[in-house]
């Protein structure tokens, strides 16, 4: 099915430690691991040399993990996709997709921060619009949501109040 809109999300916005801090920590770990390996004599009789290599490999693996989660190095992994039949939210490389089938939606409440979908079975789904990377992307997502709601005859309620 052809996508009407696909906008990127900011995956690092909802992490406890920011991407910059994670990157600085892993670079420090890599430098420390290399320092331990390069400063220890090769003909040493202890087995700590093996542990230094394991530490270095784990630090490199964590570097790949945070790059996959927070950059588009391995392709766009965090996005909001709007198609004529469904809305898909994917929050990262290792997280599950959330698909909202528009044929099951009874109503949409569109606010400045999120879109709430009232489903036929009584459940509610929401999409956080603040995670969209750019203001242009937010505008495109809102327009396409209104377009597919009109196509499926789904009532849309827009709220503009900012609750704090």
Image (cartoon, helix red, strand yellow):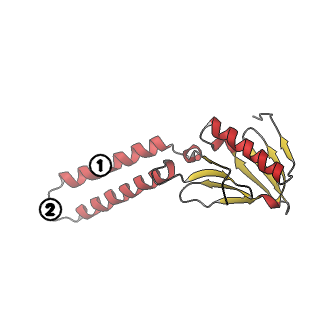
Residue 56 is drawn in which quadrant? bottom left
Query: At numbered mark 1, what does the secondary structure look like: helix, strand or loop?
Result: helix
Q: Are marks 1 and 2 in contact (CB under 8 Å)?
A: no
Front residue of 77 and 152:
152
On the picture, is 109 further left or further right than 86? Answer: right
The answer to whether 6 appears left or right of 17 in the picture is right
Mark 2 lies on a secondary structure that is loop
Residue at (69% x, 38% y) in the render: 139
- In the rendered structure, find residue 93 and report the number of the disc placed on it: none
Q: Is residue 152 above or below residue 134?
A: below
| Quarter of the figure that contains the N terminus | bottom right
Name the residue: 66% across, 57% down. Answer: 2
Q: Residues within 10 Å of mark 2 (few under 14, many from 20)?
A: few
In x, y percent, where is residue 117? 79, 52
Between disc 1 and disc 2, the foreground one is 1
* Crowdedness near tag 1: few (<14), some (14–19) or many (≥20) residues, C-alpha within 10 Å: some
> Residue furthest toward the left?
43
Residue identified by numbered label 1:
32
- 138 to the left or right of 92: right
Name the residue tied to disc 2.
Answer: 44
Dot 1 or dot 2, earlier in sequence: 1
Depth check: 58 or 149 in front?
149
The alpha-carbon separation of the residues under discs 1 and 2 comes to: 19 Å
Q: Quadrant of residue 104?
A: bottom right
Residue at 74 percent across and 55 percent down: it is 84
Q: Is residue 44 above or below residue 116?
A: below
Residue 36 in the image: x percent, y percent? 24, 52
> Can you name the residue that lies furthest to the front here?
2
Which x, y percent locates residue 4? 68, 50
Q: Is residue 161 left or right of residue 28?
A: right
Of 69 and 14, nearer the camera is 69
Q: Nearer the viewer, residue 122 or 85?
A: 85
């Amino acid at each position: 099915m052809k996508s009407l809109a696909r906008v990127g999300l900011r995956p690092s916005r909802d992490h406890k430690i920011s991407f910059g801090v994670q990157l600085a920590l892993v670079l420090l770990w890599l430098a420390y691991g290399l320092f331990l390996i390069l400063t220890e004599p090769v003909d040493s009789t202890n087995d700590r040399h093996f542990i230094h290599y394991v530490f270095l490999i784990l630090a490199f693996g964590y570097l790949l993990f945070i790059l996959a989660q927070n950059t588009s190095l391995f392709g766009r992994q965090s996005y909001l996709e709007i198609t004529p039949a469904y809305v898909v939210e994917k929050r990262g490389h290792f997280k599950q997709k959330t698909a909202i089938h528009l044929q099951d939606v009874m109503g949409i409440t569109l606010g400045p921060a999120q879109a709430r979908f009232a489903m036929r079975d009584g459940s509610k789904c929401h999409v956080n619009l603040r995670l969209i990377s750019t203001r242009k992307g937010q505008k495109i997502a809102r327009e396409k949501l209104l377009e597919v709601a009109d196509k499926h005859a789904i009532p849309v309620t827009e709220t503009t109040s900012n609750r704090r």
